[in-house]
Image (tube, grey):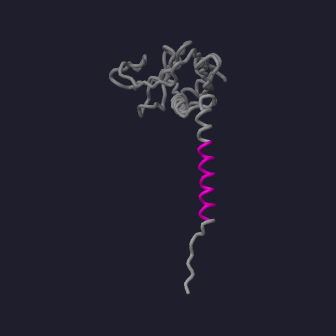
Amino acid sequence: MKSKSAFTLVEVLITILLLTLLMSTAMFSFRFFTINLKSMKVTLPKNAIHYTYLEHSIKGIYFYPFQNNYFFKKSATSFTYITTTPLYYSHLSIAKVFYHNHTLIYQESPLYTQLQNFQNPKIIKKHYQVILKKNLSSCQFSFKLYSKTTIPKEVHILFNENEKNQEEWFFSIFSNNINYKSFIEYKGF
């Protein structure tokens, strides 16, 4: 005589009960997460991506010889530099980060094109642009330079999305540029 293997009614009911408990726990957790998402202070993936883009570009700063110094222009609301690791091109580019109309913006243009004056580089009209942060109430740039030079060692971007939420982006700069190293050694740093 063959024995039949089957589930008993009790086993089926216990399985259904366990699945119901797991589903209700998952739904409760998801609902709790969605309700409290606005109050959670986390860096959203989009902001993390923009930070990483900017970090990639800044870490590739190339100390481009310019009028007996190195090309790095800074002001209270912007800074411009030459980068070996641009976001949109595969060769040296000029990049600018600036604050305008409550928005933090990154722009980039190729350095060596017919439209560019490589002896006095500027962002050209046909440039790539990405918005890093929107709806900022304020934004400040600060720079730590190597002494007696215009060469940046650190870049800080401090911004407020509203009066309560303040964030700072910090970038350390190390370059493999030979001109930069020889300049630092020559000045006795």
Counting from the top left corner in percent of width and height, residue 10 is at 63, 65
Q: How many marks?
A: 0
Is residue 154 among what the camera can see? yes
Residue ranking furthest to the bottom: 1
Is residue 71 among what the camera can see? no
Q: Is residue 15 within the magenta segment?
A: yes
Q: Nearer the viewer, residue 120 or 143?
A: 143
- Dominant secondary-structure state across the stretch colored magenta: helix
The N terminus lies in which quarter of the figure? bottom right
| Residue lying at 58% horizontally and 15% vertically, measured from the top left | 138
Residue ranking furthest to the front: 9
Counting from the top left corner in percent of width and height, residue 112 is at 38, 26
Range of residues picked out in magenta: 11-28
Task: Give the quadrant of residue 38.
Answer: top right
Q: Nearer the viewer, residue 76 or 166?
A: 166
The C terminus lies in which quarter of the figure? top right
Counting from the top left corner in percent of width and height, residue 145 is at 62, 19
